[in-house]
């Protein structure tokens, strides 16, 4: 009990959230410190920092769709998903792409991938040296191509954007299909281990769309991205999220029966989110992939999560920054 209490206190102190636009109000439920970036004092470079470029889903409601950047020691290095509107948020946040070379795709829905060509081109024209991207994403299934095939359709020799390979400087894409089968993927696999950076993954489940859950560990800090996930994928999420410092959970539906029935075949309701967070002893929760129904029900969503989980909970916003 004492160790658990100390962990919660440390988590509340270590999760620092900053909004990139002063007009976005702080959620009163948040246990984190929220300040507009334009007026906050300069902060020391954290080993691991999360920047939310897109906090929404497919709805055109003023939020960019799902996209995150992870900075390592102050250098933006890892892109997670690339939903619509993320390209604009990159510019608004003044994020340098000079070191970006790792991309993690949770699944291939449009609201998670459509900005990829623009972001890659922006990266290409930002430098005068050859670029090599490592891109990870799910294996194919149902009506979805594998990530390798998806990228070949975009950037391969006969792809829609084949010209990008030598448009400014030579660009190479090294694509890796991550096993997205619940049956064959029974434990997290290490995708990358270099110096103090480790990226691991396990199959998620998003109805018929092959999906992957990612964990990034760096210098003793960790972030897990659930991606869009339904009930079938929660056991795998529990495996990979155990004792992580920050769990980024896609929060799309209210507790039954307050959202459309079909949405529960695709997403996880707040009560289950709280149970997973508590059971895996995560340091803090960041709720994202938000929509108007969630925005209008913050109190109910938080109350449902609080039935099980007593750590810091924050509702995300575009250009928000979080330090686990």
Image (cartoon, helix red, strand yellow):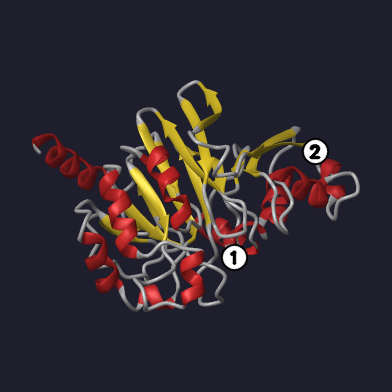
The quadrant in which the C terminus is found is top left
Query: In the figure, is residue 208 to the left or right of 173?
Result: left
Q: Using the rendered view, name the quadrant where residue 303 is placed.
A: bottom left
Q: For the residue labelled by badge 2, is the local secondary structure a helix, a strand or a loop?
A: loop
**Coordinates of residue 308 in the picture (x, y in percent):** 21, 56
The quadrant in which the N terminus is found is top left
Q: Using the rendered view, name the quadrant where residue 98 is placed.
A: top right
Name above or below for residue 272 compared with residue 203: below
Given contact means CB atoms under 8 Å apart, are the residues at marks 1 and 2 in contact? Answer: no
Can you name the residue that lies furthest to the top here? 195
Mark identifier at residue 169: 2
- Looking at marks 1 and 2 on the same chain, the residue that comes earlier in the sequence is marked by 1
**Coordinates of residue 321 in the picture (x, y in percent):** 39, 52
Q: Using the rendered view, name the quadrant where residue 39 is placed.
A: bottom left
Residue at 40% in and 38% down: 239
What distance separates the C-alpha of mark 1 from that of mark 2? 25 Å
Q: In this orientation, which residue lies closer to the viewer: 110 or 322?
A: 110
Residue at numbered disc 1 = 85
Q: For the residue labelled by badge 1, is the local secondary structure a helix, a strand or a loop?
A: loop
**Coordinates of residue 255 in the picture (x, y in percent):** 34, 71
Q: In this orientation, which residue lies closer to the viewer: 147 or 16?
A: 147
């Amino acid at each position: 009990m004492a160790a658990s209490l100390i962990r919660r206190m440390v988590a509340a102190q270590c999760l620092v959230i900053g909004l990139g636009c002063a007009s976005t109000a702080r959620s009163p439920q948040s246990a984190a410190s929220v300040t507009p970036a334009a007026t906050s004092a300069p902060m020391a470079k954290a080993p691991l920092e999360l920047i939310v470029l897109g906090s929404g889903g497919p709805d055109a409601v003023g939020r960019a769709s799902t996209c995150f950047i992870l900075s390592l020691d102050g250098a933006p290095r890892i892109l997670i998903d690339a939903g619509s509107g993320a390209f604009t948020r990159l510019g608004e946040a003044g994020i340098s792409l000079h070191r970006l070379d790792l991309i993690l795709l949770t699944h291939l829905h449009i609201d998670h991938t459509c900005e990829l060509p623009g972001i890659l081109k922006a990266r290409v024209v930002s430098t005068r040296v050859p670029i090599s991207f490592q891109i990870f994403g799910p294996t194919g299934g149902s009506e979805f191509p594998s990530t390798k095939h998806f990228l070949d359709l975009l950037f391969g020799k006969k792809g829609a954007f084949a010209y990008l390979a030598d448009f400014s400087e030579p660009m190479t894409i090294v694509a890796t299909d991550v096993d997205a089968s619940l049956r064959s993927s029974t434990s997290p696999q290490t995708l990358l281990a270099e110096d103090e950076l480790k990226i691991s993954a396990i199959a998620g489940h998003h109805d018929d769309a092959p999906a992957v859950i990612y964990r990034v560990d760096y210098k003793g800090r960790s972030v897990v991205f659930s991606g869009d996930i339904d009930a079938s994928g929660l056991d795998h999420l529990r495996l990979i999220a155990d004792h992580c410092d920050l769990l980024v959970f896609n929060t799309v539906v209210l507790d039954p029966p307050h959202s459309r029935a079909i949405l529960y075949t695709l997403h996880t309701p707040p009560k289950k989110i709280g149970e997973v967070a508590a059971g895996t002893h995560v340091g803090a929760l960041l709720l994202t992939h938000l929509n108007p129904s969630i925005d209008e029900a913050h109190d109910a969503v938080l109350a449902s999560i609080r039935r099980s989980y007593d750590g810091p909970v924050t509702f995300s916003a575009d250009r928000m920054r979080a330090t686990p």
